[in-house]
Amino acid sequence: MKISKYILPVIALITLASCEDLLEEKPKSIVVETFFNTAAEVEAAANGIYKPLRDNNYAVYETTLECQADYAYGRGSWAPLHEYQGFNDANISRVAGLWNAFYLSIRNANLVIANAPKGNAISEADVKKYVAEAKFLRAFNYFQLVRNWAGVPLRTEANMLETDLAKSTPEQVYALITADLTEAEQNLPDKPAMNGRPSKWSAKLLLADVYLNLKQYASARDKADEVIKSGKFSLVPVKTTADFQTNVFGPELVSTSEEIFFFKYTRQIAQGNYMLWITNHPSTGLFNFGGAYVVYGQTTDPFYQAWNEKDIRKGLWNKVNIGLGANTLLSSKFIDKAAIAQNGAGNDDPVYSYADALLIYAEAAVMAENSVTPAAMDALNQVRRRAYGLAPATAAPDDYVATAYTASTFQDLVLQERAYEFHYLGKRWLDLKRTGKLKEVIQKSKNITVADKHLLWPIPNSEINFNKALDPSKDQNPGY
């Protein structure tokens, strides 16, 4: 058992279930007067920000995104996602749960931001550190919301007791995200005291990703470059598929040299990674609690057929007949043969790794300068070399050459590399959206025209009914 991995504890105070409970004055009074006074209490409250994300929800979020990727399909109730014509009732309900999880995490972050500075037995340094952590996580949550729902109600520590809030524009949401992360990178520690908490490098890399989505390429390049030039991170070398499964994504790992911000899991019931249950099939024996195999690929797809057989990452897709034919592919990226429950696998979720820093830098540098620089090409080649079993930092004969690409074709090359490197991490659909290539790629790969309404997720009816500042006829996303 992975007993040394840091587990973010759960406290009842931070897991109040309903918005109505939060808005009652008496519970609020108890929180302010008897909690948030010491560093230990504020840390416990900060731990509560993670719980709504780690409780299976982030795995469900990534799966929802993956079912929409050009290389993947959804099975059962997830199947409408790969039809691209909008969400049916089952998936509307599913993403409503994700909306609630993101906002519950935001609510818990707002509690820390509002109340930590009022503590009577906590140092100013600790206040800054925990408020920075809360702002990092608040920004992280809003980054998911704005990319999938666009404009959303902007709930902060200043208005958290207000029930009725109008939608803010995407620009306003991004302004809060960048402000939160700018503060976070200044006040988060260089190295977190425990695995699973963000550092200033986590904030810089998330900020680089935000700038990339905003097409502020020079800023994205510079933030990613700060992470690279820090010298604190490196890619874990591999030689085989098993090396990826064990040394990069393995259930026994406490941390690795490429970890920048991961959701941490362990072999304890309700403390493990749910993605293994989602992706595995009982016949493979890679996860000892079977699996729901709700997302899959096909060997006949152009994406898979064009993938070089020398790329070790291709071996993380296995042919498994799940009743859909012999050409069906399932991911074996995450395996744990000693998990203790469906949600009791020990594998961490690599939200941001050193590969993210390298590939964000590569794309942003080229787009900012409108030319393929040697540094940008080398950043991409480092990720590719590792995938071919080579030393990441040493030039190789089969490296891509900068002179062979324009800025546009290089961006396509980076997107391809990101798809290979980050499959089943929920990044492909968002990459295709932010680059404006989504409809073209889906049409080419699956011969389906993506409906416009499928580009955004529906705002939950529960939010519209509860929040009187929202007008169902005007504020619901188009097509719902």
Image (cartoon, rainbow, N blue to C red):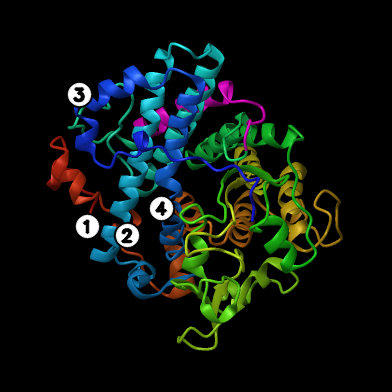
Q: Say what secondary structure mark 1 lies in.
A: loop
Q: Secondary structure at mark 3?
A: helix
Label 1, residues with CA under 10 Å away: few <14, some 14-19, many ≥20? some
Q: Position of residue 340 (x, y in %)?
A: 54, 63
Q: Is residue 365 left or right of residue 35?
A: right
Q: What mark, if any, has residue 214 been given in the picture?
A: none
Q: Which residue is mark 2?
A: 454
Q: Which residue is mark 4?
A: 57
The amino acid type found where label 1 is placed reads Gly
Q: Quadrant of the N terminus?
A: bottom right
Going 19% across and 36% down the picture, which residue do you hit? 20
Q: Which residue is mark 1?
A: 479
- Crowd around label 4: few <14 · some 14–19 · many ≥20 (10 Å): many
Horizontal and vertical percent for residue 226?
68, 31
Q: Residue at x 48, y 71 (%)?
A: 444
Earlier sequence position, callout 2 versus callout 4:
4
Question: For residue 25, which numbered disc appears in the image?
Answer: 3
Between the C-alphas of marks 2 and 4, the distance is: 21 Å
Q: Decide whether residue 455 is among the magenta residues.
A: no
Query: Which kind of residue does numbered mark 3 sit on?
Result: Glu
Q: Residues within 10 Å of mark 3 (few under 14, many from 20)?
A: few
Q: Tell me which segment is drawn in magenta.
A: 171-194
Earlier in the chain: of badge 2 and badge 1, it is: 2
Q: Quadrant of residue 192?
A: top right
Tags 3 and 2 in contact by the CB under 8 Å rule? no
Residue 379 vs 171, above or below: the answer is below
Query: Between tags 3 and 1, which lies in front?
Result: 3
Q: CA distance from mark 4 to mark 1?
A: 25 Å
Marks 2,1: beta carbons within 8 A:
yes
- For this rendering, which residue is in front, 280 or 211? 280
Q: Position of residue 238 (x, y in %)?
A: 78, 60
For image coordinates 68% across by 63% down, the residue present is: 245
